Image (spheres, rainbow, N blue to C red):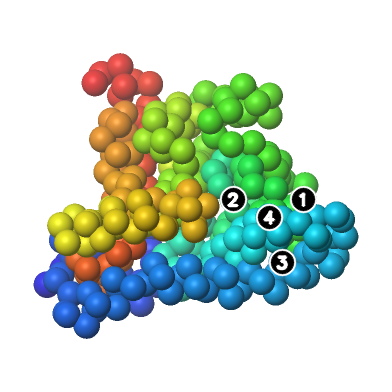
Amino acid sequence: MSSVVETRYKSPPECKLSSAPPESPSFYQRLVESIRPLIIISMIVVKGVPSAVFYQLTNPSLGFFNPFKWFDLIHKLGFAKILAYGDEIWGGYKRPLVEQANGKILEIGAGSGENLKYYNKDNVETLYALEPEKSLSTMLAENIVKHGFAEKSLLIPVGIDDKDKLAAFGVSENTFDTIVLVQVCCSLPNASAHFKYLQSLLKPGGKLVMFEHVASTDPLTRILQNLYTTVIWKKAALGCELNRASGIWMKELGGWEHVDLLRPEAENSGTLLPHDIGVFTKASYANVAHD
């Protein structure tokens, strides 16, 4: 049986975390998991159509007659709905991570602002919310106001790969007390290449908190992840890849004073979207020099 571990943050009782290897799934569990990406893609379309219609009617333009515009809106707005649905499922795991964010905070891929409700507002000095997708950043701006962060936030409509533009917004080395990554590493172009940069943005002793779906360690599940990513998932889910070992990549950077890297105990080795839940504390200058 897997063992639940004590860590520096507390999840609700129903959201147990473990460092033990996941258990094997039943045949039925593996079968259901094998079609889950197809179910999610169908949900993107079903949920995206009414949202796209509403957007087109409330933002009239010549794009109303452009089928490519419709496809793009259904795609992106449907995906935003899926993120909101996922937030209902995974909120118990996300809250204790985001709650501990403090000081100057950088959230990468803030999306439509699903994580805003988890921040402890009293501990936030400034929230730098980075979201390059226009349709998502529009909703993010609205939610920043809705959740009372208008005076404490800076919306940055720039991707992480444009470091010059980010620097113009004040995103620079040794600036942030906390970096928040919630289901974004899967879709960052060449994600692992950016991890060292993200670490450099933290102050010594600063924390990077992570909630990401990642590559499976189970061979059969990994084959399915690779297949879905190559054939349909990456295009359908805005560049998302199912087979990235984000937590392990972050840990292997080195330069961390402490690492908590766990997983939801409820997930088994057949889970097609398994999660890494991590808190990475950047080493102080003294510790880095000692190493």
Q: Which residue is mark 3?
A: 52
Give the amino acid at mark 1: Ala
Q: Which residue is mark 1?
A: 150
Real-space CA distance between mark 2 and mark 1, rounded to the nearest whole angstrom: 15 Å
Q: At 57% from the left edge and 25% from the top edge, which residue is drawn? A: 163
Q: Are marks 3 and 4 in contact (CB under 8 Å)?
A: no
Give the amino acid at mark 2: Ala
* Residue 176, position as x, y percentages in the image: 54, 34
Q: Residues within 10 Å of mark 3 (few under 14, many from 20)?
A: many
Real-space CA distance between mark 3 and mark 4, rounded to the nearest whole angstrom: 12 Å
Q: Are marks 2 and 3 in contact (CB under 8 Å)?
A: no
| 80 on left or right of 202 | right
Observer-side mark, 2 or 3, equals: 3
Observer-side mark, 1 or 4, equals: 4
Rendered position, 54 above or below 201: below
Q: At 17% from the left edge and 75% from the top edge, which residue is drawn? A: 25
Give the amino acid at mark 4: Phe
Q: Residues within 10 Å of mark 2 (few under 14, many from 20)?
A: many
* Residue 52, position as x, y percentages in the image: 71, 66
**Circle 4: element type:** helix
Real-space CA distance between mark 2 and mark 4, rounded to the nearest whole angstrom: 25 Å
Earlier sequence position, callout 2 versus callout 1: 2
Earlier sequence position, callout 3 versus callout 4: 3
The foreground one among 23 and 73 is 73
Observer-side mark, 3 or 4, equals: 4
Real-space CA distance between mark 2 and mark 3, rounded to the nearest whole angstrom: 21 Å
Q: Residues within 10 Å of mark 4 (few under 14, many from 20)?
A: few
Q: Which residue is mark 2?
A: 110
Residue 68 shows which numbered tag? 4
